Image (cartoon, rainbow, N blue to C red):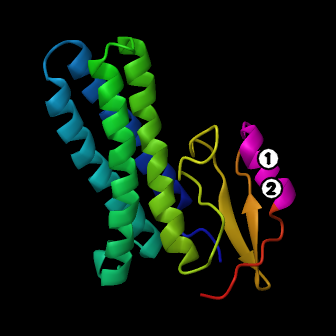
Amino acid sequence: MPDPNPDMRDGMAGMFQYVFRDLANDLASGRITVGDWQVSMRDELRSLHALELIAAAGGSRSDVSPDDWLRLGNVLKQQYGYLEDFAREIVDGNLSAAQIGARAELYAGSGKQSYWNQMTGEADLPAQPGDGSTVCKGNCGCGWQFIDGKWYWVRGKTDSCEDCIWREDNWNPYIAEAA
């Protein structure tokens, strides 16, 4: 299964990096409160993940099924949990403005999880790019390819983290259990 919209996917991640950085800057400058920042981050995360889902479905909202939207809810619930922890650290004063901005930008990579959940369908795979289970948190070019009934973890960049390198070495090929 080829990756139909890698440029669209990567372009969205780049755009949302700026959005999340701008929100962090607004927080650091006092233009918004932590509560307003958190609500805005949630809204932008929802938009990012929805757009990634649509891109993987072929680029049209009509190509996304009700079940696909329900799966998206589970991913967003996980991301909102991470965001809640992040907001607590901010309130506790544990992060500098630079740390908040850098960490906020990382959320742009999380949209890849929704993209790859859609691309891989119901396959029972051990992880997805962008699901937060790697050191890089999905800020790499990794993805799955389906060839001759088997899944392959493919690194898309030369700057892959140690977890992504391990996955390439150990999950190729990966034979998913039937759903």
The three-letter code of the residue at mark 2 reads Glu
Q: Residue at x 72, y 41 (%)?
A: 160
Is residue 105 in sight in this rendering? yes
Height in image: 110 above or below 173?
above
> Is 160 covered by the magenta stretch?
yes
Q: Which residues are magenta?
A: 159-170
Most foreground residue, 115 or 18:
115
Q: Residue furthest right?
A: 169
The residue indicated by pointer 2 is 168
Q: Quadrant of residue 137?
A: top right
The three-letter code of the residue at mark 1 reads Ile
Q: Residue at x 31, y 27 (%)?
A: 88
Circle 2 residues within 10 Å: few <14, some 14–19, many ≥20: some
Q: Quadrant of residue 135?
A: top right
Image quarter (top left, top right, bottom left or bottom right) of the C terminus: bottom right
Circle 1 residues within 10 Å: few <14, some 14–19, many ≥20: some
Dot 2: element: helix
Residue 173: image x %, image y %?
Answer: 83, 71
Query: In the displayed structure, does residue 22 sit left or right of residue 6?
Result: left
The residue indicated by pointer 1 is 165
